[in-house]
Structures are given as structure tokens and as C-alpha cells.
Image: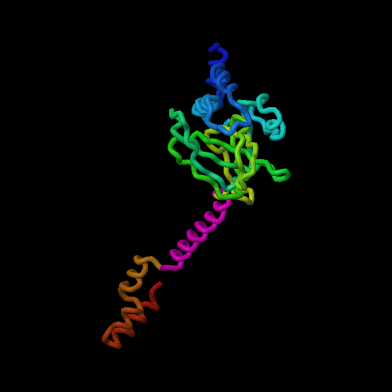
Amino acid sequence: MSLWAIILIAVTAVPPLTEGQRARLDTAIDDSARLDESGLYPLLENALTWADHDEAGARVPDYAALLDNPTASRGELFLIEGKFAGRARRYPLVRTGDWGDSLTEWVLLVRDDPEQVAVVYFVDPDGELTPPRTGWRVRVLARFYKVWADRDMDGKPTRYLTFVARSPSGVAAAGGGSPIGAALPMFAAIVALAVAYVLVRRLRRPSPTRLRSVRHRPGSADDAMLSRDPAEALRRLAEQRDEP
């Protein structure tokens, strides 16, 4: 590997494919019913080295062009955005490695008319990736693998575009906003109301020290009322009125 290639890998979040990985990827066979081929594994190896979701250098795919000429863009880094189609499963692999023994498969609806889906395989060794709800929007940084020949839910032969990714870079509710972000304003309002309620209660409630001083201050009106001698009570009330 050249010095420039080593420097490029060190400074980019998504390292490029090596020459060896590229050569193995080029053996992938399009429109084959077999997905688990030797060309898949260099993409898995590469995905394991991704540091984060740096989208620099990724482009939005032209799905029609990928179907027409998949070899021209094989292994290219794409930014895929679509709606989760409600299909998630674990796809077992023939070869195990640091990527585990299975991949996590998500199907994303990337175009409505005509309908087009992208099948994304996540490197998820422990199967911890939680699928979103059907219809939620998903954003994924992924490399293009191949055109896979399979059948759809109705048993009709279909050509699928397949991609390999490390993890989704964004998941949002069907309305467009993040489900967590949408709940934050409401949560903040509830907390503010609770704090205001506690403060008002404290301001309206006399302190225990003041209550004790009022109840036990010598010569107070309360002491006068509690005196058993009426004359003594009147004397104490008069003294209290004369106090400055």
C-alpha cells in the first residue's frame, strides 16, 4: 500500500477500498439469486473500519442507472434516504469473521412512482440494531454491492439493489422530526410546570421557624387569650398595644 493511501485512510472516516478488496468485489455476479458471494466480504471488512457517519464524498444514488449498469458503481459510497418498508431480518452468512455470523437486513422504500426499494445489509455482529417503525424515514451511508435477483412478497421475480452499511446515520418519525427531538419540548414544559408548582407551594407555606416564634412569643395575643386570669390577659393585651 502506498504512503498516500495510508494517509488517506488515516484522515477519512470511511476508508476507501484497498486494491485487494476491490479485486474481490469485482467478482460479484449481478442478477444472481445468490447474495452470499466472495464479493460481499471485502465490503464487510471495509465497513468494520468506519469511524463515524462522515458523509463527505458520498452521493445520492441514481437507482435507475445502478440497475442498468451496476458494474460502473460497484463499491461506491452512497447516501441513501428512504422509508422503512417494515421488513427486517437476520441474514446468515457462510463465512464468519469480525462481522459475526449474520447481517441485519433492512428494506427501504426510496422511490414511490415507480416503486423502488434498496436492501441494506448492516454489519451488526451481535444483532443489536433495532428496526424503526414502518414508514419512518431512514438515512444510511452505504456502499453499493450488486443487483440481486429474488422474489417480492407476492412471489414476483424482482431485481433488488443491495448495499452494505455499518449503521444508520439517522432515523426519524414519519412526520419528519426525530421522535426524541419532538418529545423534548413537551418534556421541558412538564418539568417547568412542576418546578413552578413547587416554588409557589414553598412561597405560600410559612416556615416552621416563624410558626414557632408566633406561637411561643411571650406576651403575644395568643398568650393573653390562653391566660386563665382575665385580668392578667387584659394587662398583657394593653402592654402589647403600648409596645413600639
Instruction: Name the residue: 52% across, 45% down.
Output: 131
Residue at the (30%, 72%) spot, across then down:
216
Q: Is residue 200 magenta?
A: yes
The quadrant where residue 164 appears: top right
Q: Quadrant of residue 11?
A: top right
Q: Is residue 211 left or right of residue 58?
A: left
User: Would you identify the image quadrant in which residue 128 lies?
Assistant: top left
Q: Main secondary structure of the magenta part?
A: helix
Residue 113, position in %: x, y? 73, 45
| Residue at the far bottom in the pictured view | 230
Magenta stretch: give its range.
180-205
Name the residue located 62 percent from the left edge and 35 percent from the top edge. 149
Identify the colour scheme used: rainbow
- Examine the rendering and report whether any part of residue 31 can be seen: yes
Out of 211 and 23, give the one closest to the viewer: 23
- Residue 96 place in picture, x, y as percent: 43, 29
Q: Decide: is 175 above or below 99.
A: below
Q: Nearer the viewer, residue 175 or 74?
A: 74
**Residue 211: x, y in percent?**
36, 70
Q: On the rendered image, what quadrant is the C terminus found in?
A: bottom left
Q: Is residue 182 magenta?
A: yes
